Amino acid sequence: METESEPYVRLATLRQLHRVVAELNTARSLADTLQTVVDGIVVGLGYELACVNLVRPDGDLVVAAFAGDPAAEALITGRVGSRASWERRLTMGENWDGLRFIPHTEGWVLMEDDVPQWHTDGPDPRFEDEWHPEDRLYAPMYASGGELLGVISVDRPRNGRRPGAWGREALQMYAFQAAIAISNARLRANMQRALVRLEREQQALRASEESFRQAFEYAPSGMAIAEMGGDQHGRLLRTNDALCRLLGRPASVLRRYSFSDLVHPEDIGTLLRTSAEGGRAELRLGRRDGTYVWVSLRNSVVADAADGPRFLLTHVEDIEERKRHELQLAHRASHDSLTGLPNSAELRARLGARLCRRPQSVRASAIEALDAAFEGRDGYEGHAAHGAHGGHAAHAGHDGPPVGAEAGGAGEHGFHADGPDRYTGADPFEFPGAPPGPSDGPYDHHVHTVAPATDVDDGTKGLAVLFCDLDGFKSINDRFGHHTGDAVLIEVARRLTTGVRDGDTVARLGGDEFVVLADGLGAADAADLAVRLRNAIIPPIRVDGRAVRVGASFGIGWASCGMSADEVLRSADQRMYIEKRSRSKAHRRAG
């Protein structure tokens, strides 16, 4: 009878197996899949109790799902058995084509290990294939790579017998399908976690980008993003409102430029030497109105983890006021506080810049070199014999460019206000070819300064040093006080300044002594200049409604390489005293 019904039993079992396997793939989460596995064993495979022991990341196995007995489920669900104890069990007993059966005759040694287990009551078996309450049957589940995923434990077959060949095969097939379902459920769970993590990262990235955008757009100082590498290296990709306001250009226009297009020509070397990562530089950038503004640049690289550096983020800080104060401090250190003229230290520095320690014997080609250096320069010959000279000398910061430069033209940059704050982008008193100071090296690095050999104008041009000492100034100071004396000095400085060319230096040594440096003059030119300056000083000076007059004595010296600045000034001073003594006191005092 049993033999005749075997095909029917197999067919019914197969239908049940098909149904529960189909349900395995409908679970939405790993926990639902595990519970479906044990429920399918109880419902479809004919066991009263079923349990899934799942491998944890640390290798131990945890009771993840239980079906068939609520009391046993509450007792052991969530409990953990060590990997070593489970490996011991899976090597004991009988191997049923992938299943592991441990009969009660051997299982008693497992009563004290740490694997969670339950105990059922029942009578001792009467037949050889009857199920004993202490029998154990395990169905290991393996992933496609061969690693252990977990173990299915079953107990108490409903027919009371140990499973036959078909029952074993059905359990083995079910364990194989359960392993696939659990792997898929884990994959879905990992994907869901990855998607959640990705969404959180994207939200954080969007929040970070928005924070950066707001910090970039609304920063009080200028910010710019420039391209790195390629044909468009350095081109501005994005600028904030502060930088647009600073440079007076809209963002759409700035995107056509790079910083190298905007930087002052004299600062291009500074820009190119500034490193991309952490580089700092102070330079001038051009504004829309043609002026230049001092800024501090700080660079940082916006890098891509895969492709390397992508963009250059530049912070642009307006340092115009600081530079203005620095120029003011430098001006105060090098100029007389009363008259605004260069002081003694500045005079010596400018004079020393034209001199080298060339031996006096080296004069063979000096005339030719000097003529070549001053070829085409305007001298005093073209000026009228009478009347004041046009232009301004170094006075109160109105230092003009060297003769031949276009004052106020395209070469003038930076500060444009009159006074000590004015900045033209270059020191107008740095003579062409002048070395930074006296040099003992080769003499071909600058044009040597030579002096006319005699007082006769033989065509030699040189650097004339006119030493001026006021006559009658002490009596004005004594009679009318220092206030009047200061006013006289200021007016004398103004008259001297307006009486020389652009590029000439008028300096105050101290007291009532002034010095004029005039380059490119012959002996007759220097004498003519001294006369004109003396005539400019003689007219009365009105102070507080009172007219006072001073005279002036001039001594003409000549700067020459091989001399020091002090030697040149001492020579001019001595000539001034000779000239002063050669005139009577009445003639020295101009009224």
Image (spheres, rainbow, N blue to C red):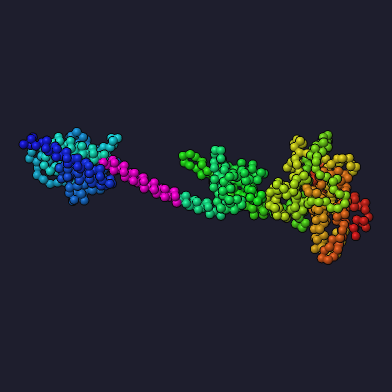
Residue 76 locus on image (x, y percent): 22, 48
Q: Residue at x 67, y 53 (%)?
A: 324
Image-based side of 303 in relation to 505, left or right: left
| Quadrant in which residue 486 is drawn | bottom right
Q: Residue at x 23, y 46 (%)?
A: 35
Image: magenta residue range: 181-207
Q: Is residue 342 visible?
A: no
Residue 163 locus on image (x, y percent): 14, 38
Q: What is the total number of numbered labels drawn onto the structure image?
A: 0
Residue 99 locus on image (x, y percent): 20, 36
Image-based side of 260 in relation to 26, left or right: right
| Quadrant in which residue 10 is drawn | top left
Membership of 48 in magenta stretch:
no
Q: Main secondary structure of the magenta part?
A: helix
- Residue lying farthest to the left in this orientation: 1
Membership of 187 in magenta stretch:
yes
Q: Residue at x 64, y 53 (%)?
A: 320
| Nearer the observer, 143 or 329 | 143
| Nearer the observer, 565 or 550 | 550
Q: Residue at x 77, y 58 (%)?
A: 338
Up the image or down, 502 lies above or below 175; here it is below
- Residue lying farthest to the bottom in this orientation: 545
Up the image or down, 56 lies above or below 486; here it is above
Quadrant the N terminus occupies: top left
Residue 265 locus on image (x, y percent): 66, 44
Quadrant the C terminus occupies: bottom right
